[in-house]
Amino acid sequence: MRRGIAVFGGTFDPVHMGHLRSAIEVAEYLELASVRLIPASQPAHREPSVCTLEQRLEMLRLAVAKEPLLEIDERECNRPGPSYMVDTLASLREEFGSAVPVVLALGVDSFLTLSEWYRWEEIINLAHILVLDRPGWDNLLEEMVPDLARLLNECEVHARAPLLETPSGSVLRISLTQLNISASQIRQFVANGRSVRYLLPDLVADFILKNGVYKSGTDA
Ligand code: ATP
């Protein structure tokens, strides 16, 4: 097993098979013992979550309880104020040192918003960025804002070696198993009284039903 840390941040409102399958395949691709799922306590770059942090955490716990390749990292939950990824990566660096490879995995939709993130230009000095393709987002990289195009131009690599052998600084795009599932679709299905079975783990579907969350359809 290799040395290195991979993180997959998100609102996880709720966690679903798209997140879980991607994170498992990132762990395998990078030959790491696990990937850290990092729930945002107060999402910084999007609208507030529908479920409370405690509910989102509980759904994550139910989802990963039996999966050693996935662990929950609660560092953003314990930090007051908005959850900025740059702070999260800096705190990982403080904990694990400057030499260890750190990989920030995110979907291409998130990557396309990167230049709007707080102190975004520092992120590439703290971590590598692993961009995961998502169905329906194929051509959007062509519509990148100039700042992001410059980052890709300067930092893109086409092999995983730099992500395993250096601490930070590379951007790699990969296609793993792509599941066309999103949390907003799941919330919409619940609001419309439709089944969400098999879009997310059974225990998470049970939690949603039992607690009556997402029924009021706040995204509609
Ligand atoms: P929403 O629909 O509410 O925007 P989401 O399903 O995109 O939510 P988030 O928690 O916002 O989930 O996303 C966390 C991370 O997971 C982001 O990097 C996002 O790109 C990625 N992601 C979400 N769904 C998938 C998926 N089906 N496949 C791959 N990556 C995904």
Image: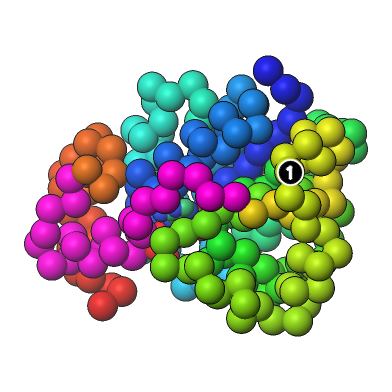
x, y percent for residue 120: 76, 66
Most extreme residue toward the right is: 98
Residue appearing at x 81%, y 73% in the figure: 150
Return the residue at label 1.
Answer: 159
* The quarter of the displayed image where residue 36 is located: top right
Residue appearing at x 56%, y 62% in the figure: 108
Q: Which residues are magenta?
A: 174-197
Q: Is residue 47 above or below residue 89?
A: below
* The quarter of the displayed image where residue 142 is located: bottom right
Q: Is residue 66 above or below residue 139?
A: above
x, y percent for residue 212: 17, 54
Residue appearing at x 35%, y 57% in the figure: 180
x, y percent for residue 216: 19, 69
Most extreme residue toward the top is: 1
Most extreme residue toward the left is: 193
Q: Nearer the viewer, residue 114 or 48?
A: 114
160 left or right of 196 in image: right
Q: Is residue 198 above or below residue 180?
A: above
Q: How many other residues sit within 10 Å of disc 1, few (<14), some (14-19) or many (≥20)?
A: few
Residue appearing at x 64%, y 26% in the figure: 31
Q: Amino acid at mark 1?
A: Ala
The secondary structure type at the circle numbered 1 is loop
Q: Nearer the viewer, residue 163 or 3?
A: 163
42 left or right of 128 in image: left
Q: Is residue 87 magenta?
A: no
